[in-house]
Image (cartoon, rainbow, N blue to C red):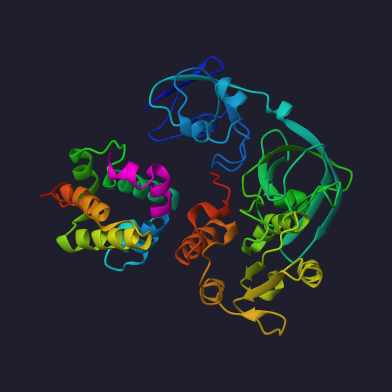
Amino acid sequence: MSVYEKIGGEAAVDAAVDIFYRKVLMDERISEFFDTVDMDAQHAKQKAFLTMAFGGPNKYTGKDMREAHKHMKLTEDHFNAVAENLVATLNELSVPQEYIDEIVGIAVSVKDDVLNK
Amino acid sequence: MSIVSFEGKNVALDHGESVLDGLIRHGYKIPVGCRSGLCHSCVMAMDEGEVQAVAQKGLTEAERSLNYFLSCQCKPFSPVQVRRVNMAGKQVSGTVVDKCWLSDTVIRLRFKAPLDYVPGQYVTLWKDEIVARSYSLASHPRFSDYLEVHIKHIPGGKFSPWVAEELAVGDTLGVQGPYGQCIYTAASAEQPVFLAAMGTGLAPIYGILNDAIVNRHRGPISLVVGASNPENFYLVEELNRLVEKNDQLDLHLVARESDRERFIVGDVYKYCRDRFFDLSGCRVFLCGAESFVRKMRKQCYLSGARMSDISADAFLPFGGK
């Protein structure tokens, strides 16, 4: 069973995405990457990201990750900031630590693609 | 580049050009309104070719199955064959029953039309067979047998000067709709409600507010109305009357430049940020110019409102050429 299923599937993602997207928008280190005219589209993207990080059904490939982040000139600090906000979101929702570890593991697994290494 | 086959001729579209703009550029008279996919005045049918989902957004199931599409939103990648559809069948006839100025810049138009709507929705009004514009409804079917819209007067425009100078009580005009999802709903009658309007965004907000009251909403309702200067406020007496009658309602009229004691002086965004810093659990309605709605939406979300709890009606300027 994936973490996605264990924490409640799409309902869990819906609960998390509002909190997570709000956190990254308020985080001055990374808000510029998330601030856009089309909040709905960005909200949907974050939902897709969380679904992936939770190990749920998603269509992400390493290549997509690379392509999507290619021109953003992201650094290790940016990646860590997103990870911090992810962990803070999960803590806020009282997700058990072992699940958080698993989710962070999935997020870290796409790090090289995101940072274009 | 793509080819549009229309009324026996082939029309070449420029790169990124919509079917609507291409046909108009080639001299065809095509009904046009918002050019944003909202007013439904430019609906056509596609007989050959692929209809993109984006060009059918907001159409009914039946319209979709007939291959109807919004020609302003349709930018085909491959050749298409399209034809006009008679949208007159989608219109009802409205008869003007009242017209007056609510402020120096806003005209209130009341007309009777056989049309069911929910307050906060909008209709498309037809000046003639070509020019159409969308306006939000301020009336409530419970209180009035007419529909009411607030029309911002834009000198030199194709629609509002016609309303101001020519349209008279007793005249008829085509009415199409209603459309739109920015209507009163709440998780419960106790949920706090936050409404914010700028300019004629007050029209749908006034409708939504009345609908909340009609539906016996008991939770606190806060209404913020913004204006650049106090002369632009309208419906103030009606709003104050609602406040007197409804304990759960509080009203905040915020003008950037104001010397009157009746109004709050300041920037509406800052005022909302300071006064309504915690909107978690709140049902939010935002109506007005696109820039206002976009800024407020982000601000309300950052103040804790859930994205799915924010309903918005952004007024788009006519994307004319």
Which range of residues does the magenta coloring cover? A1-17
Q: Position of residue A1 (x, y in %)?
A: 28, 39
Q: Is residue B15 visible?
A: yes
Is residue A12 magenta-colored? yes
In the image, taking residue B288 as reference, residue A19 lies left or right, namely left
Q: Main secondary structure of the magenta part?
A: helix
Depth check, front residue: B166 or A96: A96
Q: Position of residue A76 (x, y in %)?
A: 15, 60
Image quadrant where residue B213 sits: bottom right
Depth check, front residue: B270 or A107: A107
A91 versus A64 height, above or below? below
Residue placed farthest to the left in the image? A117
B10 versus B271 height, above or below? above
Quadrant that contains the N terminus of chain B: top left
Q: Position of residue B104 (x, y in %)?
A: 74, 66
Residue at x 26%, y 39% (from the top left corner): A60
In the image, taking residue B60 as reference, residue A46 lies left or right, namely left
- How many numbered circles are shown? 0
Q: Position of residue B305 (x, y in %)?
A: 51, 61
Q: Is residue A38 visible?
A: no
Residue at x 68%, y 54% (from the top left corner): B204
Residue at x 74%, y 32% (from the top left corner): B91
In the image, taking residue B317 as reference, residue B125 lies left or right, namely right
B29 versus B289 height, above or below? above
Is residue B18 magenta-colored? no
